[in-house]
């Protein structure tokens, strides 16, 4: 079963925008700017055009190729040829988009506070806290964005760490089990991804 690592807060964790800047001065400004623009977008009436703008910007902000590689780690090169790599990248992109769109409305119900940025293995971890506006007594949700890029950008999101749990690591554990279980394998993994996309 393909579980959804932290998709309940995916929309908060991947706060993107309609006209996201290709360059920002710092990784935290990259995240802050995207969130502010997305918040403004969500105030607009729902429409196909708005959804298309969100999807387009989401694609610009997230480095899907790198994110998917991290979901597979050693299996990317050893178990997946070019055709399989392209297939799973497309499927995971659809899943991320689907989950993001489903949770968009949730972003209006959270205040996001930026609590600092620190270097991590050559990348930058932008740390945030999300607090419910509706139920301020609810526990604060800790969300970190792993951002790649140097200097003044461009930057891209390559992982989301929610409550100290990595999205890509969550998927990796599932995929590793499927690819190393004799009764499962690549075909089984792909079908699980397709089933997830097909579900309402």
Image (cartoon, rainbow, N blue to C red):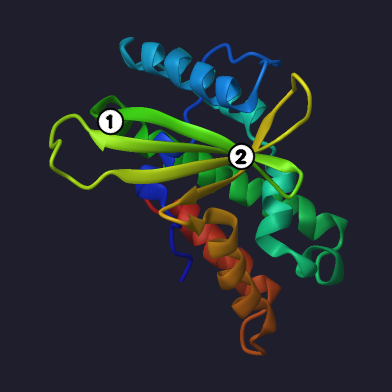
Q: Residue at x 46, y 41 (%)?
A: 98
Residue linked to disc 2: 118
| Helix, strand or loop at mark 2 | strand
Q: Is 54 situated left or right of 153 in this image? A: left
Q: Is 19 situated left or right of 51 in this image? A: right
Q: Residue at x 59, y 62 (%)?
A: 169
Q: CA distance from mark 2 to mark 1?
A: 23 Å
Q: From the top left corner, tell me how far across and down residue 110 is, in percent.
A: 28, 30
Q: Residue at x 43, y 42 (%)?
A: 10
| Helix, strand or loop at mark 1 | strand
Q: Badge 2: few (under 14), some or many (20 or more) residues near its Cα, within 10 Å?
A: few
Q: Nearer the viewer, residue 59 or 139?
A: 139
Above or below for 88 versus 64: below
Q: From the top left corner, tell me how far across and down residue 49 is, in percent.
A: 47, 13
Residue linked to disc 1: 110
Q: Tell me how many marks there are.
A: 2
Above or below for 78 versus 67: below
Q: Is 81 situated left or right of 11 in this image? A: right
| Residue 136 placement: quadrant | top left
Above or below for 165 versus 107: below
Q: From the top left corner, tell me how far across and down residue 126 is, in percent.
A: 55, 36
Are the two marked residues, 2 and 1, in contact with CB atoms closer than 8 angstroms? no
| Residue 199 placement: quadrant | bottom left
Q: Residue at x 13, y 37 (%)?
A: 135
| Residue 60 placement: quadrant | top right
Q: From the top left corner, tell me how far across and down residue 19 is, in percent.
A: 57, 11
Above or below for 52 versus 171: above
Q: Nearer the viewer, residue 3 or 111?
A: 111
């Amino acid at each position: 079963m393909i579980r959804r690592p932290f998709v309940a807060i995916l929309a908060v964790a991947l706060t993107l925008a309609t006209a996201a800047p290709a360059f920002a001065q710092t990784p935290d400004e990259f995240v802050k700017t995207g969130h502010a623009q997305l918040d403004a977008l969500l105030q607009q009436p729902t429409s196909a055009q708005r959804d298309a703008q969100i999807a387009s910007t989401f694609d610009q902000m997230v480095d899907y190729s790198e994110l998917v590689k991290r979901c597979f780690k050693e299996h990317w090169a050893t178990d997946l040829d070019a055709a399989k790599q392209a297939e799973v990248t497309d499927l995971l992109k659809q899943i991320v988009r689907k989950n993001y769109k489903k949770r968009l409305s949730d972003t209006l119900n959270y205040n996001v506070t930026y609590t600092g940025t620190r270097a991590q293995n050559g990348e930058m971890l932008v740390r945030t806290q999300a607090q419910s506006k509706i139920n301020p007594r609810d526990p604060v949700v800790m969300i970190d964005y792993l951002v790649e890029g140097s200097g003044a950008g461009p930057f891209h999101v390559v992982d989301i760490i929610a409550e100290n749990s990595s999205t890509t690591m969550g998927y990796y554990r599932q995929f590793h089990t499927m690819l190393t279980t004799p009764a499962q394998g690549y075909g089984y993994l792909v079908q699980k991804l397709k089933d997830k996309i097909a579900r309402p």
